[in-house]
């Protein structure tokens, strides 16, 4: 929920959990936020400070809570006295603003929670993200200005700079490919919007360009499902994390700093924009090739995704699980008007992400429509969170693609010549389940049914399970 809050607002989300099982229950969500660079502050309890590490057998005691958190946070701090709390909170928000935004965890032992102390709480910190080095920007601008076939690839780190992405793309007349987390940084229907990086046609296009500007993306294996990127031209990479340069591809001109500031400085350093040449036609060619590529697996999902898009308001948010309906349907066919409208756990690929993340977003922005798109298996990972949506009377359509299986695992096992094993699911009666939570339920047998059901769900006080019985 804190992750969804952060993605939809651009501000850090905060969660509070207990020690032991609270930490381990939250660990997958914290790891997803780490993988996708989402600013989440997790405040957790801890056993009495004098017994930490002694293994005395306290309730909720882990062998090492610190070790559990070390690999899934940017920083994990054990606070052994109340006077350390203000500085630790300030440091967490400094990290969110000035570096790659990843989760920070503050652990407060029960005796510290109960301690009395005179603590000065300083004013809220006002940290600005780092501005890039001017010489680095000039070198990058020179490479881009000399390109005859430029392109951009944009990741989740550029969501806050979407207006600058569009301006620079138009200045360069450069088609824009996005990663899954970058989707929405340029409107889907913009003439320079090319495709998603997951398609071979998009990756192949980038490899044929003479200059590529990568903004806010790791250029990671999770971004390119079809294999590592092998550029034939030069690469300019903008990232707030200098440690990312060269990890997944050699970089000709690295620019360290905030994406918005870097794009603004690059635009200023470039010569006046020439008249548009062939950027729109190049982008259209990539879109067309990617569409044909997506249709190989996505054809059955296309009318459903169009119906869902038709039912959702323009400036709404879609929250997805790792489901076939998302990967083969929403990824290629769900159009977006702008940033922070697409919430996808692409880094860690966590099942069960969509429902709680959407709840966090609705708490943050109750005025903004949101919907969940999940498979039956993914939905059951966090099904009890339906209670939170019902308790807070959130108008939330929860679209469940019910094929009574872990469909993608089933498909991949057959593809590799194995008889599928342990992929069929006993899915509960979703109508009865919804009623037990005080939620609504509707079955949709045709795409038009889906559109109508989602429209009604957005006007209903409380969540609605919208079942698509995909086994029929």
Image: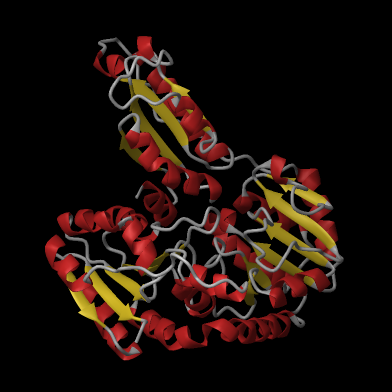
Residue 309 appears in the figure: yes
Q: Position of residue 183 (x, y in %)?
A: 54, 67
Q: Is residue 126 visible?
A: no
Q: Count the labels in the image.
A: 0
Name the residue rendered at 41%, 28% in the picture: 106
Above or below for 280 versus 117: below
Residue 432 is left or right of residue 400, and the answer is left
Query: Relative to the observer, which residue lies in front, 291 or 167?
Result: 291
Where residue 85 appears, as percent x and y from the top left, is: 38, 20
Residue at 44% across, 54% down: 7
Drawn side of residue 259 relative to residue 85, left or right: right
Q: Quadrant of the C terminus?
A: bottom left
Residue 111 drawn above or below residue 195 = above
Of residues 71 and 267, which is closer to you in this image?
Answer: 71
Residue 353 location (% of width, % of height):
40, 57
Location of residue 100 with respect to 409 vertically, above or below = above
Q: Quadrant of residue 200?
A: bottom right
Applied colour scheme: secondary structure
Residue 405 drawn at (x, y percent): 40, 71
Task: Write the residue at 43% across / 63% down.
Answer: 321
Say which of 318 and 190 sits in front: 318
- The residue closer to the viewer here, 144 or 371, is 371
Quadrant hosting residue 385:
bottom left
Residue 216 is drawn in which quadrant? bottom right
Seen at 15% across and 69% down, the residue is 432
């Amino acid at each position: 929920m804190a992750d969804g809050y952060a993605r939809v607002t651009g501000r850090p989300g905060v969660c509070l959990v207990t020690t032991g099982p609270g930490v381990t229950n939250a660990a997958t969500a914290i790891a997803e936020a780490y993988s996708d660079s989402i600013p989440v502050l997790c405040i957790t309890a801890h056993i009495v400070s004098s017994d930490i590490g002694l293994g005395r057998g306290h309730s909720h005691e882990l062998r090492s809570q610190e070790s559990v958190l070390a690999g899934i946070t940017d920083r994990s701090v054990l606070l052994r006295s109340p006077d350390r709390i203000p500085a630790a909170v300030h440091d967490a928000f400094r990290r969110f603003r000035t570096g790659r935004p990843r989760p920070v965890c503050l652990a407060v032992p029960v005796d510290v929670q109960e301690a009395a102390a005179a603590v000065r709480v300083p004013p809220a910190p006002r940290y600005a993200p780092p501005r890039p080095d001017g010489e680095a920007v000039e070198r990058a601008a020179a490479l881009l200005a000399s390109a005859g076939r430029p392109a951009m690839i944009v990741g989740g780190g550029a969501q806050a700079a979407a207006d600058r992405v569009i301006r620079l793309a138009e200045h360069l007349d450069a088609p824009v490919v996005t990663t899954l987390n970058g989707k929405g940084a340029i409107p889907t229907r913009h003439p320079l919007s090319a495709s998603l990086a997951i398609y071979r046609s998009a990756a192949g296009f980038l490899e044929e360009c003479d200059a590529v500007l990568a903004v806010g993306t790791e250029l990671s294996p999770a971004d390119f499902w079809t294999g590592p990127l092998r550029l034939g031209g030069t690469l300019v990479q903008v990232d707030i994390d200098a440690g990312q340069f060269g990890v997944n591809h050699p970089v000709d001109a690295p620019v360290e700093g905030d994406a918005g500031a870097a794009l603004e400085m690059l635009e200023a350093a470039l010569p006046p924009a020439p008249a548009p040449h062939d950027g729109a036609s190049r982008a259209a060619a990539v879109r067309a090739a990617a569409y044909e590529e997506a249709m190989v697996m996505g054809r059955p999902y296309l009318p459903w995704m169009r119906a869902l898009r038709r039912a959702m308001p323009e400036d709404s948010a879609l929250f997805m699980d790792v489901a076939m309906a998302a990967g083969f349907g929403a990824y290629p066919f769900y159009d977006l008007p702008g940033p922070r409208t697409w919430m996808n756990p692409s880094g860690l690929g966590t099942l069960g992400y969509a429902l709680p993340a959407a709840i966090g977003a609705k708490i943050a922005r109750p005025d903004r429509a949101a919907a969940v798109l999940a498979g039956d298996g993914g939905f059951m990972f966090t099904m009890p969170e339906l209670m939170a949506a019902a308790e807070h009377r959130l108008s939330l359509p929860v679209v469940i693609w019910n094929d009574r299986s872990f469909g993608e695992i089933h498909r991949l096992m057959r593809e590799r010549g194995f008889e599928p094993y342990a992929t069929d699911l006993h899915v509960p009666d979703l109508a009865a389940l919804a009623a037990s939570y005080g939620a609504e339920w509707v079955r949709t047998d045709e795409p038009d049914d889906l559109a109508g059901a989602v429209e009604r769900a957005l006007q209903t006080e409380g969540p609605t399970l919208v079942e698509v019985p995909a086994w029929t």
